[in-house]
Image (spheres, coloured by chain):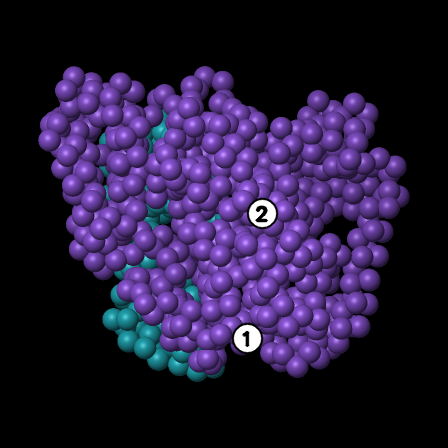
Chain colours: A purple, B cyan
Amino acid sequence: MATEMEAALPRLTGREDFKSFRAGAEERWQGMWDGTRTVVSVGLDSSSIPKGADRVLAACRAALSSSDAIVREVSGNGALWMEPWVEMMRPGEPPVVYANITPEEVPVLLAGGLRERAVGVRAESAFGGIPPLSAHPFFRHQQRIVLQNMGIIDPWSVEDAVARGAYSAYLKVLFDLSQEETIAEVAAANVRGRGGAGFPAGIKWESGRKARVLPKFVVCNSHEGEPNVYKDRKIHESDPHRILEGILIACIAVGAERGYNYIGGEYPLAIKRFRKAVADAERLGLIGRNVLGSGKDVFFRVRTGGGAYICGEGSAMMYSIMGVRGQPRTKPPRSVEEGIWKRPTVANNTETLANIPDIITKGGAWYASIGTEKSKGTKLMTVQGPMATTGLVEVPMGITLGTLINECWGGMRPGHTFKGIQTGGVSAGPLKEEHFDLPVDFDSLTDVGGMLGSGGFAVFDTDVCAVDFARYLTAFNRYESCSKCVPCRLGNPALVEILDRIRLGRGSLADLALMERTSKHIIDLSLCGLGQVAPMPLLGMMQMYPEEFRAHIVDGVCPAGSCPIGVPQTVAAAAD
Amino acid sequence: MPATTGDEIDLDVVRAMLAHIQPGDHQEAQELILAALQEVNEHFGYVSLAAAEVVAEHLGTTASRVYGLLTFYADFRTRPRGKHFMLLCHGMSCYALGSQRLVQELKDTWGVADGETTADGELTVQVVNGCLGVCDRAPFVKLDADYHGDLTTESFNEVLRRTIEAGGSWKDADHGH
């Protein structure tokens, strides 16, 4: 269906042109939901397609080909646990979402069966005994700004996005607001960088605006390479125009002639959907010379990474865009002074930029009313591990860790006992049940050795050994070290070597002090952010589970039973 | 090093693939090196030195610059894939639910480690040091065009046996999961 519309996309040359295009898109959107026809939507993205969602969609299309029903592809909705899901709206009824549907079950579902599989109604109130989806514990605590279109619009369709408000904020920035006024809204929102560092976007934009060297660039950092984060991938897959609009607004606000989006190469579907969004925006005339007759030029490039975690670091990302190895450099100069091709470059995380359209539309004060005193707005959070309802949620900053774990993510799956939760990806330590009352925001977890980071959490159960997990996390950083500077390149392998000694039951108590000393060297002497935090997960594990490290060394046992103590070293060589 | 399926990269095909990449200036040409390599890598499963030279020539740079990128970025391979190709997710969900055991099983039973190909050229394994994003079905692998989740050591071996017995190859896969 996306291809039919491509030919039909008009070239818009003025503000009124856009308004009439939007009116058409809104009319089409409302017509679809007017209750006269059956509308079947299936969520397709990188997590649901492997479970057969594409075959479920094909089965729906086949079964309804001779009817007047509308069968649509949408993205997943973040609830990995209910995939593949089908949303069905029959004439005169609200849309109902059914979980875990197989292609074989589609005929039964369409005939009105499988009522027990209904998770919720996508409406305000219950219907036929089925509660609203928003009452489900997974959704109850969520406040979706960045994800407001997730699982609702067809991510291939610019008309769907525009019908739901896309590019309204961009128009406001093009025609109604000055650069200073736009940045003032972002500053008032006090939106802090969602990539992990938490630096205020408004300050960064103001430095970018003031930079005097031309041309300037804006880069969206969509390279989340951590082994436990999938939020930016999901924004691309569900609502690519929201990201694009955020980048274009940033370009206008700082006076950049070109925007970039740097996406991890391991996300093919995210790349495809985003490229389609850019192509459609170019066709419509939202990108290019003299956008909508505003007199402003904005150009755009999509660049893809090659599977190197380090390219999430700002300067490494820019080197990667310039076609060299992604290895960080010393700062200053900051990238806002010297970035891509030595020109002033404003770099923001995907989630940060995806918040911008609503901040412009509804105002910075509205955004700042959500969240905590120092951490405004909502935050996307993902979980991994044996949870009952695994997935991506968008919750207000300040939600407690316990609410996240026990309600949003449904607590542990049967047969698994909670042991801890790794926070901050591979850049911080774990937390325990005693920390469940802590509010999750940029600052609160840091005091106890955790970190919000980019919002990636991993719950582990009692079958996971703290020493082995520390090795896994340290080995990740060893593998991903760019090898530019010595402390990181040699320090991390040394830590892995010592950890292997302990895992094999050959460690000594002196090894604990040696690891702490080595860690200190890596932290103090490494050049970039990856090296400076690489030993943090290990130190966190040592602090949180000292008895387990001692048990391996002193008693010669692995309490979780997973380390190869007593196994000959040749056989037990750890998996890299 | 391990046996290969023996296919050589047809450089004329590479040239044809690159024809659509037409940079406007030298800066843009450099920005497009990685993208060009990704296309070649995706199509052939690896980028040979000769193919890297073609990319360098097309974009006005040196083979050493291109090869330096190939060996830095983990997504690229410089040797052919075996008949079957496995992406083994080693994200935290997969780790917490036992992907390490699968890596060990590959070593013990199949004689193959990360980045390697089995001696008979049947299977190449790439451990994903990131996340494939199917965290509720951990541990999880993508084998050729198919996905397999909730794996135990037994079901993992079974899936591998069945795939190899069935013939076919990674080339049957849709490019891009």
> Mark 2: few, some, or many residues within 10 Å (few <14, many ≥20)?
many
Residue named by callout 1: A255
Q: Is residue A363 left or right of residue B83?
A: right
Check the residue under mark 2 and report the chain it is in.
Answer: A
- Which label sits on residue A377? 2
* Spot occupied by residue A408 in the image (x, y as percentages of width and height): 57, 31
Identify which residue, B23 or A13, lies in the foreground: A13
Q: Give amino acid for label 1.
A: Gly
Identify which residue, A266 or A20, lies in the foreground: A20
Q: Give amino acid for label 2.
A: Gly
- Which label sits on residue A527? none
Please report the residue visible at 59 percent of the width from the left and 55 percent of the height from the top.
A189
Q: Is residue A66 left or right of residue A177?
A: right
* Spot occupied by residue B158 in the image (x, y as percentages of width and height): 39, 29
Please report the residue visible at 72 percent of the width from the left and 57 percent of the height from the top.
A165
Within the image, what quadrant is residue A333 found in?
A: bottom left
Please report the residue visible at 66 percent of the width from the left and 76 percent of the height from the top.
A291
Q: Sequence order check: which comes first, mark 1 or mark 2?
A: 1
Mark yes or no: residue B172 visible. no
> Mark 1: few, some, or many residues within 10 Å (few <14, many ≥20)?
many
**Helix, strand or loop under label 2:** loop
Within the image, what quadrant is residue A161 found in?
A: bottom right
